[in-house]
Image: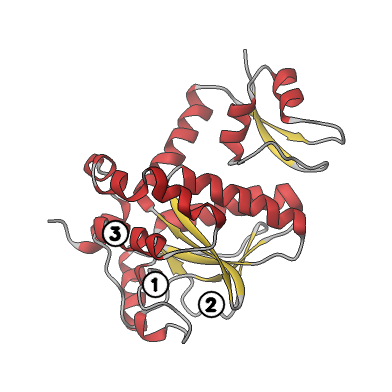
Amino acid sequence: MLPKHLHSTRLFTAFAAGCFVAASGGAAVAEGQSLRGSRSSMDRQNRVAQAHDFTFIDTPARVRYFAEQGWLVEVVSNRDVVVKRDVSFPYARPEVELFARRLGSQYRRACGEQLVVTSLTRPATRQPRNASDRSVHPTGMALDIRYSWNRQCRAWLEDVLMSLERQGVLEATLERRPRHYHVAIFPQPYARYVERLTERGIGGPQLQEYRVRRGDSLWRIARSHGTTVDEIREVNGLQGNQIYAGQVIDVPLGG
């Protein structure tokens, strides 16, 4: 067996064909679509952590050691993403950093706000009192995102999270006290998902930014760009057909 720390960046097909299919199939995924969280959602997160052979890091010193070895990477603020200053350990698995960067860019373009990350890797000895004893934060595969009081931003974010849940690359829960989104990234499936999108951008249709105008619909935008509604939904992580005037989306250019 490979050492635990080496599994964070490996893509192996046995995981896709075995454990993960069982963890994210059919009715089990549909159950989590309200973002309410459940025991089965926690089960899936823990099964994915075990399938990746992730270590549940217990102390701050071990977090720093994992970061020094490159098994965790720093998540930094930029024009799209803000990592709160009180995040004691701004480190996560590389795929979580990739997720935060990609989502932050899309989120800011969609509603004009920065995505605010309020928690990343938390060692087991530094968990808050209200944390579940089954939390995957100590593995580095989870992050918390601040709840937005802007209804449009909130609707967009929840649509994207539920869309990615259905594709089996994460589990998301809207926590109530305090309000925030807990997102557990499934590193290998998420990396494969991004690879597919990247391959489409290189060898397939090129993407063009489009600012939604009043009266636009996905059908109208797709028709004028020679693509399909499904293609637009996929590249933007949209769950339904709702878009907003002023929103910026990526549109695949058809033939």
Query: Counting other residues with Cα less than 10 Å from the Cα at mark 3, is it few (<14), some (14-19), or many (20 or more)?
Result: some
Task: From the top left corner, tell me how far across and down residue 15 is, in percent.
Answer: 25, 46
What residue occupies the far right of the structure in this picture? 214
The quarter of the picture where residue 124 lies is bottom left
Q: Secondary structure at mark 2?
A: loop
Kind of residue indicated by mark 1: Ser
Q: Return the residue at label 1.
A: 135
Q: Residue furthest left?
A: 1
Q: Residue at x 25, y 63 (%)?
A: 5
Q: Residues within 10 Å of mark 2 (few under 14, many from 20)?
A: some
Task: Give left or right: position of 158 versus 218.
Answer: left
Q: Are marks 3 and 2 in contact (CB under 8 Å)?
A: no
Choose between 172 and 188: the one closer to the eye. 172
- Which residue carries the number 2 mark? 87
Q: Where does the image place residue 148, in percent across and percent down from the top left?
A: 70, 64
- Between tags 3 and 2, which lies in front? 3
- Disc nearer the start of the sequence (2/1): 2
Of the image marks 3 and 1, the number of the one nearer the N terminus: 3
Question: Label 3, on which residue?
Answer: 47
- Residue 221 seen in render: yes
Q: Identify residue type, mark 3.
A: Arg
